[in-house]
Image: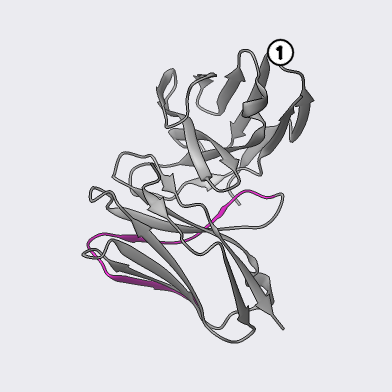
Amino acid sequence: DQQVKQNSPSLSVQEGRISILNCDYTNSMFDYFLWYKKYPAEGPTFLISISSIKDKNEDGRFTVFLNKSAKHLSLHIVPSQPGDSAVYFCAASAGDYKLSFGAGTTVTVRA
Amino acid sequence: DAGITQSPRHKVTETGTPVTLRCHQTENHRYMYWYRQDPGHGLRLIHYSYGVKDTDKGEVSDGYSVSRSKTEDFLLTLESATSSQTSVYFCAISEGQYQPQHFGDGTRLSIL
């Protein structure tokens, strides 16, 4: 049973606009959340994280929002750039060093 | 980039043969992990290690074993490979709790 779900397999966005990726989780013990970006034939690259004591974390063009009551987090990318075209994975941990991943969302940034 | 090297990068083998994948790190991180990535499943944890000779099972550990005799090396073994183990395997490392995991570039394993 998948505890982390990314319900949108793909997202297409115009260059310069905002990309919003969503992630839902079911395990209320999760307290640390991460987003990874993956290009073909490469390993996932860490983007940004957030702990459950916060509801927002920013790093440059990337912002992650956490809504604990809804068990939902989102990643905003502003502005979207061609190099952002990749697969994005949401992941979560219950503080036990292990990560549970969503199935990924493929983002395509159109010129 | 984190110093993580996976070998081999590609391997094709036959059902029933043993296969060992190697992960080597130069970061001296305590924690090491093996994942497999399959379409529709994201990454799923196979085994992980929290120190030399200290390992534990993940979500999809059946048919896999691991060993860690040195801090820098974490081996994943398929004792008798099956076609269902065809996948892309990723190694990851981390410094500890509430620290991000950093991944190698993967091994693409095909079992015919």
Residue B4: percent from left, percent from top: 61, 40
Residue B3 lies in what quarter of the image?
top right
- Secondary structure beneath label 1: loop
Using residue A108 as the reference point, say whether residue B58 is left or right of it: left
| Label 1 CA crowd tier, 10 Å (few <14, some 14–19, many 20+) | few
Instruction: Give the quarter of the image for residue B75.
Output: top right
Lateral position of residue B6 relative to residue A102, left or right: right
Q: Residue at x 25, y 59 (%)?
A: A52
| Chain for numbered disc 1 | B
Where does the image place residue A16, in percent across and percent down from the top left?
Answer: 60, 87
Across and down, in percent, residue B52 comes to 44, 21
Tell me, yes or no, whether the highlighted magenta stretch contains residue A52.
yes
| Magenta stretch in the rendered image | A42-62
Whether A2 is among the magenta residues is no
- In terms of depth relative to the viewer, which is nearer, A89 or B53? A89
Of B92 and A7, nearer the camera is: A7
**Residue type, numbered disc 1:** Thr
Count of marks, rendered view: 1
**Residue labelled with disc 1:** B17
Residue drawn at x 29%, y 44% as measured from the top left? A95
Residue at x 49% of width, y 39% of height: B44
Q: Is residue A78 above or below residue B81?
A: below
